Image (tube, rainbow, N blue to C red):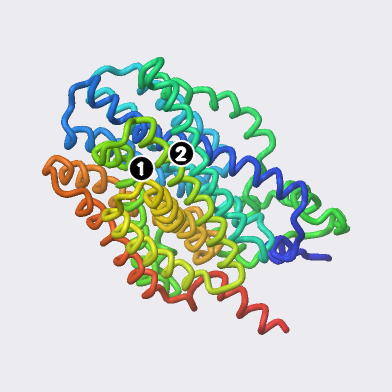
C-alpha cells in the first residue's frame, strides 16, 4: 500500500496554477481586509469634525476595531482549525464587509465604535487563517516570499483607502469610503467553492478522497491509486484537541511569549501610524490630500519591505532579517520626526512603511514558520490576537500625546521605542524550536 506525506510533497512541489489560485484569493482578501482596517485612519480628521470629538476620544473610536481584531485573531483563528478554513474565511469576510459598511450609517461615537468592534472580529480573524493557508500550500523554497506577498495585499488595501479617500471624503463625505467596504460580501460563494480545505484539517477528519484531489492539483504528475493513503508529519498532532496548550509544549513556551511581545511592539508601531499618520502630517502643515499622499507612500514602502524581507528570508535566516527590520524601523521613525524637507519626508515615510508595516507583515511569516502545521492557525492567531494589545494602546496613547501638543518629533520617538523592544524580543526566540528547524533536522536524519 502506497503512502504519501502531503507536507513533504507540498514542500518539494513547484509553483503552479493551484498555488496561484490560493495566492490570488489570499492577496485579494488581504487587500479588502487592509482597506477595511485603514479606512478609519484616512477618514479620522473628517469624523472628528463631523462628530465633534477630541483626539483622545477619536483614539478610542479607532481602537474599538482593534479590540475586535484582538478577539477575532485569537478565537476565530483558533476556530478555523476546528471547523475548516474556507468556512472561517467566509464568516470573517461577511463580518468585516457588512459591519464596516454599517459604520458609515452611524452618527455618534458609541454606535460607530460598536460596529467597528464587530467588523474588527472579522478583520482580525482572517489574518492568521490567510497566513496558515498560504504557508501550508506553499513550496518550501518560496514560502516566506509567498506569505509576505499575501500580506503585501494588506498594504494595497491601505493605498486604495488613500486613493479613494482623496476624492470620496471631500465630495461625498467620510461615510462613502465605509459604504464601499460592503461590496466584497458578494465574493463569499466563490471563496467557498474554490478555496481548498486545509490538509491538516482533512487528515484530522480522515477525508482521504478530498486529500487525493488536492494532492493531484499540487503535483499533477503524481500517480495515485485508490489504495494510496495520505499521511503527514503532523497527523498525530492534528488529532489533538488542545491547540492553545500545544503552543507551550516541546520547548516553545518562552519563545511563544517572545513572539507575542514582538507582535505587541510591531502592531503598536503599525496602528499608531495607521490611525494618526494622516493627522500628524496635517499637524505639520499639510492639507488632507497631501497627508493622504504620505499614506500612499507609507503603504508602498510596506509592500517593498514585506516582499523584500520575504526574499531575504528565503535566502538568509528569517529571524536575523526580522531583528534588523525592527531596528531600521526604530531609527527611521526617529529621523522622520526631525525631517522638515518635503522631498526627504516622502523618502523617510517610505522607509518607515518598509520597516514598520513591512516588518509586521514579515513577522506573520515568521510566526507561520515557527509553529507546526497542526497548530499554525492557532499560533499565528494568538500572536496576532495578543499583539493587538499594542494595536489597542497605540491610537489611544498617541491621541493622548497629540492632545498634549508636544513637538512633532516626540510623537514619532514614542512610536520608535517599540521597534527597539521588538528587536530584543525576536532575539530571544529559540529558533531551534521552530517548525522549519524541526523539518530540516528530520530531513537530515532521513538522508
Identify whether 384 is placed above or below 283: below
**Residue shown at the point (55%, 27%) measured from the top left:** 184
Q: CA distance from mark 1 to mark 2?
A: 9 Å
Q: Are marks 1 and 2 in contact (CB under 8 Å)?
A: yes
Mark 2 surroundings within 10 Å by alpha-carbon count, few (fewer than 14), some (14 through 19), many (20 or more): many
Identify whether 102 is placed above or below 389: above
N-term mark: 1 or 2: 2
The image quarter in which residue 279 lies = top left
Q: Could one spot residue 312 in this view of the protein?
A: yes
Residue 436 falls left or right of residue 2 = left
Q: Give coordinates of residue 298: x percent, y percent.
A: 43, 46
Residue 181 falls left or right of residue 344 = right
Residue 325 falls left or right of residue 219 = left
Residue to which mark 2 is pinned: 158
Number of the label disc, if any, that sits on residue 274: 1
Helix, strand or loop for disc 1: helix
Mark 1 surroundings within 10 Å by alpha-carbon count, few (fewer than 14), some (14 through 19), many (20 or more): many
Q: Give coordinates of residue 264: x percent, y percent.
A: 32, 56
Amino acid at each position: 500500500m502506497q503512502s504519501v506525506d502531503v507536507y513533504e510533497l507540498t514542500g518539494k512541489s513547484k509553483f503552479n496554477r493551484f498555488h496561484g489560485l490560493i495566492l490570488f484569493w489570499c492577496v485579494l482578501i488581504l487587500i479588502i481586509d487592509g482597506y477595511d482596517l485603514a479606512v478609519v485612519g484616512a477618514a479620522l480628521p473628517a469624523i472628528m469634525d463631523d462628530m465633534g470629538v477630541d483626539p483622545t476620544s477619536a483614539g478610542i473610536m479607532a481602537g474599538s476595531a482593534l479590540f475586535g481584531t484582538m478577539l477575532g485573531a485569537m478565537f476565530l483563528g483558533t476556530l478555523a482549525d476546528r471547523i475548516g478554513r474556507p468556512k472561517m474565511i467566509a464568516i470573517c469576510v461577511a463580518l468585516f464587509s457588512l459591519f464596516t459598511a454599517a459604520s458609515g450609517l452611524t452618527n455618534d461615537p458609541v454606535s460607530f465604535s460598536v460596529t467597528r468592534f464587530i467588523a474588527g472580529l472579522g478583520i482580525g480573524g482572517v489574518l492568521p487563517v490567510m497566513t496558515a493557508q498560504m504557508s501550508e500550500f506553499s513550496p518550501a523554497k518560496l514560502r516566506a516570499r509567498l506569505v509576505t506577498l499575501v500580506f503585501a495585499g494588506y498594504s494595497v488595501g491601505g493605498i486604495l483607502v488613500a486613493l479613494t479617500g482623496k476624492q470620496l471624503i471631500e465630495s461625498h463625505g467620510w461615510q462613502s469610503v465605509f459604504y464601499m467596504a460592503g461590496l466584497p460580501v458578494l465574493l463569499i460563494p466563490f471563496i467557498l467553492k474554490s478555496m481548498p480545505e486545509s490538509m491538516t484539517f482533512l487528515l484530522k477528519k480522515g477525508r482521504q478522497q478530498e486529500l487525493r484531489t488536492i494532492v493531484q492539483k499540487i503535483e499533477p504528475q503524481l500517480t495515485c491509486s485508490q489504495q494510496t493513503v495520505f499521511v503527514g508529519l503532523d497527523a498525530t498532532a492534528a488529532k489533538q484537541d488542545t491547540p492553545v496548550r500545544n503552543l507551550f509544549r516541546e520547548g516553545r513556551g518562552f519563545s511563544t511569549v517572545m513572539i507575542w511581545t514582538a507582535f505587541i511592539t510591531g502592531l503598536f508601531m503599525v496602528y499608531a501610524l495607521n490611525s494618526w499618520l494622516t493627522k500628524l502630517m496635517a499637524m505639520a502643515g499639510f492639507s488632507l490630500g497631501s497627508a493622504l499622499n504620505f499614506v500612499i507612500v507609507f503603504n508602498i514602502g510596506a509592500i517593498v519591505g514585506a516582499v523584500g524581507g520575504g526574499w531575504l528570508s528565503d535566502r538568509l535566516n528569517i529571524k536575523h532579517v526580522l531583528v534588523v527590520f525592527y531596528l531600521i524601523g526604530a531609527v527611521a521613525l526617529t529621523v522622520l520626526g526631525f525631517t522638515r524637507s518635503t522631498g526627504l519626508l516622502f523618502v523617510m515615510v517610505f522607509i518607515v512603511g518598509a520597516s514598520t508595516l513591512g516588518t509586521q507583515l514579515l513577522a506573520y511569516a515568521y510566526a507561520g514558520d515557527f509553529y507546526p502545521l497542526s497548530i499554525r492557525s492557532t499560533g499565528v492567531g494568538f500572536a496576532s490576537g495578543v499583539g493587538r494589545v499594542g494595536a489597542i494602546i497605540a491610537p489611544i496613547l498617541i491621541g493622548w500625546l497629540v492632545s498634549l501638543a508636544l513637538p512633532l518629533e516626540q510623537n514619532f520617538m514614542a512610536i520608535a521605542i517599540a521597534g527597539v523592544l521588538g528587536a530584543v524580543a525576536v532575539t530571544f526566540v529559540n529558533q531551534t524550536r521552530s517548525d522549519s528547524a524541526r523539518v530540516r533536522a528530520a530531513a537530515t536524519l532521513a538522508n
